Amino acid sequence: MEYRDYYEILGVDRSASDKDIRKAYRKLARQYHPDVNPGDKQAEDRFKEVNEAYQVLSDAEKRRKYDELGSSYQQWQRTGGQPGGFDWSQWTSGQPGGGFPGGGYRVEYMDADDIGGFSDFFRTIFGSMGGTRTERRRTTRRALPGQDLEVTAQISLEEAYNGTTRTVQLGDRQLNVKIPAGAQTGTRVRLSGQGMAGYGGGQPGALYVNVEVLEHPQFRREGDDLHTEIRVPLYTAVMGGAVRVPTLGGSVSLNVKPGTQSGQSIRLRGKGMPKLRQQDAFGDLYARVLIQVPTNLSEREQALFQELRDLRAES
């Protein structure tokens, strides 16, 4: 019978913590899960190996026994191996000396398909652990929750402002995902039970939709606030007056004060993005003023500007 190195299968050290083992298992199980690799026999076999290794290393009693077996097996290997091979008898059926535990009653196993395709090594070493003499015991696989899945959904800034719906394709499944108003890059929408199916009767995982908001040609977003630029005629900047300012909710009128400078930002309260899951709460819009200097002046206009310059020079 061939010894199986469960630590090597999971890619962890023999001193690995329970957390490290669980993390390694989840990564590999997600990679080789049959739902992710339909029809791939090699991936299915690898998944069964990973599952078997986790069954042992995640169970304190099984891991203790396995570590003791591993020490003996490694010592046997270091001596070059003894004639007749390694003595498995003291490790089989959960009892020193081998044979059937408790003296002569039979241990029955489920089909390999029912227990996740466990190897002869697993059956021999761990098949009888955990039962009592009076029961007809079977080795059963542990129910494992399904892995979570993640997908990315790109939306426009307008969709982030109003909220939207995206259709996500998962294999042969189509799911409509509601993305709330105020979502921003990094927002995650969780759909419970829509991830990978559980293993051995475990609960299915969740689907996480990671939102990515695309850049906008007119608005720059910072959290819940928006920034934009507005062109203000020179005369309005000097004398004051009303200008139209675009917002995602429609353009609004803004009164520009006399003497407004180019580059100055004007704050429009509540005209930014809706705050995620906060009803009727919005960020602000900051409009940066760009003063438009008139071109193609008539002779009369040039004369007036000359007069103004002369007046400013005298003051």
Image: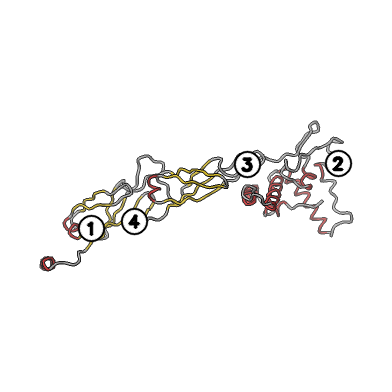
Percent x, y of residue 133? 81, 33
- Residue sitting at the far top: 134
Q: Identify the disc placed on residue 218.
A: 4
Between the C-alphas of marks 3 and 1, the distance is: 61 Å
According to the image, label 2 marks what residue?
A: 99
In the rendered image, which quarter contains the C terminus? bottom left
Considering depth in this image, is 178 or 108 the residue closer to the camera?
178
Considering depth in this image, is 155 or 147 the residue closer to the camera?
155
**Residue type for callout 2:** Gly
- Mark earlier in primary sequence (3, 1): 3
Q: Residue at x 16, y 56 (%)?
A: 239
Between the C-alphas of marks 3 and 4, the distance is: 46 Å
Between the C-alphas of marks 4 and 1, the distance is: 16 Å
**Residue type for callout 1:** Val
Percent x, y of residue 291? 23, 61
Percent x, y of residue 50? 69, 49
**Residue type for callout 3:** Gly
Dot 2 crowding, Cα within 10 Å, few <14, some 14–19, many 20+: some
Q: Is residue 246 left or right of residue 120?
A: left
Between the C-alphas of marks 4 and 2, the distance is: 78 Å
Q: Secondary structure at mark 2?
A: loop
- Mark earlier in primary sequence (3, 4): 3
Give yes or no for contact between labels 4 and 2 (Cβ–Cβ under 8 Å).
Answer: no
Considering depth in this image, is 304 or 83 the residue closer to the camera?
304
According to the image, label 1 marks what residue?
A: 232
Between the C-alphas of marks 2 and 1, the distance is: 93 Å
Percent x, y of residue 13? 68, 54
Rendered view: 271 above or below 83: above
- Locate residue 279: give its quadrant: top left
- Mark earlier in primary sequence (2, 1): 2
- Mark earlier in primary sequence (4, 1): 4
- Mark earlier in primary sequence (4, 2): 2
